[in-house]
Amino acid sequence: MSTSKFSALLQSKCPRCRVGKMFEGPIYGFKKQTMHERCPHCGLKFEIEPGYFYAAMYVSYAFSVAEVVSLGLATAFLTKSESPWLYIIVLFSAIFLFAPFNLRFSRLVLLHYLSPKVSYNPQYERNLEK
Ligand SMILES: [Zn+2]
């Protein structure tokens, strides 16, 4: 059975084999998030070209805008407050809370959906079953 692209993305798996993990450790924790340089299963080099993850900034920016706009609207609807301090506190804490999530998933979205050079090879998963 092959893993779907979306579930591989949610489990932060490698875009080529969908078996090896791209990141070490959990998304939230006291240690800094570390990404493997190469996939531990198939050996794909995640940073395809030098500076490749600069492109993940655009994905991360889209995530941040979506998070801040939806949280700002939710705060407005739920509290009906006009105090700028409430919005500053809510939105800045959201930016800090979502930062590790944005880092990990912007890179995952970039490699899984926006990188034409990286394609899924089901052979790696089939070899695992044998
Ligand atoms: Zn892999």
Image: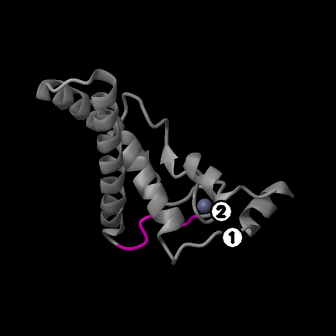
Picture coordinates of residue 7, whole percent (x, y): 64, 50
Tell me which secondary structure the magenta stretch mostly adopts: loop
- What residue does disc 2 label? 17
Q: Which mark is residue 79?
A: none
Q: Secondary structure at mark 2?
A: loop
Relative vertical location of residue 8 with respect to residue 47 in this rendering, above or below? above
Relative vertical location of residue 48 with respect to residue 3 in this rendering, above or below? below
State which tag comes first along the sequence, 2 or 1: 2
In the visual, does 118 lie left or right of 75? right
Stretch of the chain drawn in magenta: 43-49
- Can residue 23 be seen here? yes
In the visual, does 63 lie left or right of 120? left
Q: Residue at x 55, y 59 (%)?
A: 39
CB at disc 2 and ligand 1 closer than 8 Å: yes
Question: Which color mode does the image show?
Answer: one colour
- Residue type at mark 2 is Cys
In the visual, does 100 lie left or right of 105? left
- Residue type at mark 1 is Asn
Q: Residue at x 55, y 66 (%)?
A: 44
Q: Which mark is residue 121?
A: 1
Q: Quadrant of the C terminus?
A: bottom right
Q: Which quadrant of the picture is home to ligand 1?
A: bottom right
Q: Residue furthest right?
A: 130
Q: Quadrant of the N terminus?
A: bottom right
- Can residue 37 be seen here? no
Q: Residue at x 42, y 48 (%)?
A: 104
Picture coordinates of residue 117, whole percent (x, y): 51, 77
